[in-house]
Image (spheres, rainbow, N blue to C red):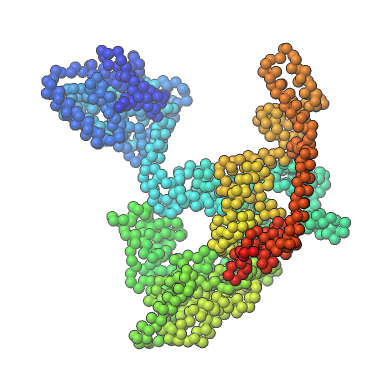
Amino acid sequence: MKWIHSVFSRNSKKMGVKMQIKGKSEFVIVEEKELSGGFDANKDDDEDDGDVMTRLEKLRLIGEEPDLSEELIKDNDQLQEDEVLAMESIYGENIFILDNHNGLRSFQIHIYIETPEELTISTKLNSSQDLNTYTNNSEGFSYSFEVKYIPPIILTCVLPKSYPTHLPPYFTISVQWLDSLKISSLCSMLDSIWKEQHGQEVIYSWAEWLHSSTISYLGFNEEIILGPYGVKHQGDPRAFSGCVSPDVDVPSLKSYNEEQRLENFLKTLQECCICFSEFAGAEFIRLPCQHFFCEKCMKTYAEVLIEDGTVNKLSCPTTKCGGMIPPGLLKRLLGDEEFEKWESLTLQKTLESMSDVVYCPRCETPCIEDEDQDAQCSKCFFSFCTLCREKRHVGIMCITPEMKLRILQERQTSTQMKDKQRQREREMIEELLSVKEILRDAKQCPSCKMAISKTEGCNKMVCENCGNYFCYRCNKVIDGYDHYRDGACELFPQEEIQHWEEQMNPRQVIGRQMQDELMLGDRGHSCPQCRQINLKVGNNNHIFCWACQGHYCYLCGKMVKRGSQHFGPKGCKQHTQPSTSSAARHFSDIIPKSSRNSRWASRNQRMKSYEVASLKFNPKQEEVDDVVLEKSRLFGEEPDLSEDLIRHNDQLQQDEVLAMESIYGENMFILDNYKGLRSFQIHIYIETPEELTISTKLKTDNRSDSEGFSYSFEVKYTPPILLTCVLPKSYPTHLPPYFTISVQWLDSLRISSLCSMLDSIWKEQHGQEVIYSWAEWLHSSTIPYLGFNEEITLGPYVVQRQGDPRALSGSVSPEVDVPSLKSYNEEQRHENFLKTLQECCICFGEFVGAQFIRLPCQHFFCEKCMKTYAEILIQDGTVNKLSCPTAKCGGMIPPSLLKRLLGDEEFEKWESLTLQKALESMFDVVYCPRCETPCLEDEDQDAQCTKCFYSFCTLCREKRHVGVMCITAEMKLRLLQERQASTQMKDKQRQREREMIEELLIVKEILHDAKQCPSCKMAISKTEEEIQNWEEDMNLQQEDEEILDDELLYDHRHSSCPQCGQINFKVENNNHIFCWACEGHYCYLCGKMVKRSSQHYGPKGCKQHTVG
């Protein structure tokens, strides 16, 4: 194996090392290898003196080999072999065995020296380009930087036959960051070590000394000084220095340090600052700001922000960093669809944040506003005023929105207005009224003009659209809180402060009581950094402080920087069991003792219930509502029961719970025993009509007496009622179960009435198992009992009422409840669609909904049919017809869905065809005659290519000719034909013009019997033969239909469509008939229209197949 013998080159280029063996004329060319940051030796007299092996050859000739016996030579050879094997096992990949040099062993060791944690490298920079000016006496300035890794010392050795008994190894030392004098001192030190260990193997001692003592021997404590440069030193010929100049050495050392840092980062375990999990560095994303996070967390972080549309917050997750995430990294993290969404949102946010960008009122294209507050659209060329968004009116005052609204409302009474104009103006009136209503209680961001309404809090506002801060009171852009420190505006309005104090004063008293209880308990612990009391969660001793965002240990009270280092066999235990009765004391301590505390606890429990009754239920995370159930348990005193009666009740409870599990299945969740009592939770889905209307009253502000407007929407599914029960030991013989009812869409008074009804049912069935009766009553009778026939009214909101403490309401506000209920309904609809059988409207096959494609227009088709449909249209090139297959729908098929259906090749073809069709449909787009690039035609019917910059006339497609009449196609053809007879024309020019003549003759022949489409100029020909053939086919078809009608009159297998009256023929034994006239489906037996075959035919319906 051939290895490189000289590692560094002065210019960091590829280098071949020659080994010249005395007495022979051959050269051995060593394998070339590129090594960054390398160097040559200092050249003295000959170029070969710069090569390592050449110098070693010279050293071998200088040192005379003594005459040794064969036996001694064998002993030395064996000692050398053993030493080399030992060095290979110690240095592994850092030792390279070279080819035998003139029968002698040779190798090279890369020795990485011991350095402090951070090593400073300094040098002196000079403005002069002359290397001789880099001296200690020259003027300049010092430059220093810190590194953790520096290039290794390279020790190259050739072992003579008399080593180790007589002579030392021939060696060279190569160092990139030392000058030749310092390397010469290292060579002298190796000679001294050989003198001390004469006759012994010395290479390991040399390598270890260079590894551990180089820095201290050269007097570099924590700083290495490069240079001096430009000074020629006559040092040891075995010393090879790679120092060139600061311009070369500094970037080289920095680059090496960064590469080694990255390599070490990828190999070692790192902790993610988001999920606090440890992975190998290769699974992390390192941002340009040097913060790093695991790939999974970064992907989720980016997807969440893009889904929310807050791309302006998509920066480094580290607090107060704000470092940019490169687009290339986002493209790697996200899918194509999410990345396209990020690009479009970023462009939209950028345009909206630009103060001089406005949108065209006609086509919504972004335009640049000029100094006169006018703009012209670059797409439709509409010139408009940016204030009133009407046609540009120079010298005329803008019409205000109020005046425009009044004029439009007056014009609605006109009888001379067309229906389309009236409808258009009615939409403008609605839009102006909406803007007026929005701006009545909102202010526009001074940067991007986004309407923002303040519901509560301070006057320092941040615009979610552009991210700028502004004052809500004076509507000026601000930088921070300095605006309020100057006294220009108040940070908090007096009404807001008064309202906040009224709400917070009762809570402060309770908060202090809770803090005292936590300090007395064994689960509360103060943060050693900010002294905030935090609660220990479960058995985990790793506590996160919500106040200072720090982590600390519950056992030793010290801050924890990395969990894997603090917790373990040699550190604290991460999980320990709490002391006995701590959980019981925790529940009993937080029971409220006063009415004010009761109201506070009740509100907290309602908020907790809202989280439990959220849209996506996770029963493993749900717990019994401890405070409410504890109160219920204390109110009902347990009677003294005999052991037999307790066992009897326990058996009845066990049987009832098993029966409820078998009935409710996945909708029942067994919880942990609560103080030795059985506890469980049932999700009860109520019976509702086919479509249930939910209505509420929306208000424009937070005042209870303000006027609002009603809003209603229809749903098919509502979130379930959550019935949580704890069974006392005296149930069912004496006491009822302790229970709570949680409903997201009811207020506390209505839920309290449900609790009262369950109490009544218990009184009727006292001494019997009652939970099934409760659940069935809630399932079937909740809607009629509350007086909701086909409409549920949400609210009332804001009104504080004292209801049953067991009633937990999830209603927050219309702004929260309405989207939540809509989202839940859509999720359930989609889930039901995926599970049930659906019928494809193309192939009429029935499949599970998961095998269907649902379009934005809500029509759905099986995936196989949609794929075939798209492939056929793309194959035919009719991509303009690629829309929803339903007749008269024309709904768009999203590109992401097409990409999922089609292969890469078909999707690329669709993209190119769509672009081509779009360009062809634009009347002002022409193609460059030279490079076929699409160009825009101007008003003078000229165009300039954006690729080759060729200006041409769009009529004759020749070079632009201002003021000169276009040459017609006939004249051009005649001129070209006449020029073909010229003898002075070159062959290439003649061939080019001959091709132009052939093209003009073809176009002339096509246009002879064709006409051009007025939109895209496509030549279309209509032949008489096609008309004649069509007439013959239609006549034959008419005769066949007459014969068929006569046959149908005498055949019992025909039937008329109940929808359009068209006579259709029954195919074989199938009673499911398709009407070709109205495209409807009906039954041959009963004559009724069929919407879904699986519901119409079957054991309880008509038979789909009958004989005859």
Q: Position of residue 89 (x, y in %)?
A: 24, 36
Query: Which quadrant does the C terminus fall into?
Result: bottom right
Q: Is residue 596 visible?
A: no
Task: Please tell me in which quadrant of the rendered image residue 1089 appears.
Answer: bottom right
Please tell me in which quadrant of the rendered image residue 202 appears: top left
Can residue 266 be seen by looking at this rendering?
A: yes
Q: Is residue 1085 left or right of residue 538?
A: right
Q: Is residue 583 above or below residue 421?
A: below
Which residue is at a point 62% across and 72% down the rendered structure image? Answer: 689
Considering depth in this image, is 649 or 83 the residue closer to the camera? 649
Look at 70% across and 64% down and name the residue there.
Answer: 1052
Q: Nearer the viewer, residue 402 or 932?
A: 932
In the image, taking residue 923 as reference, residue 690 lies left or right, namely: left
State the residue at coordinates (62%, 49%): 869
Q: Position of residue 824 (x, y in %)?
A: 57, 64
Image check: 869 left or right of 157? right
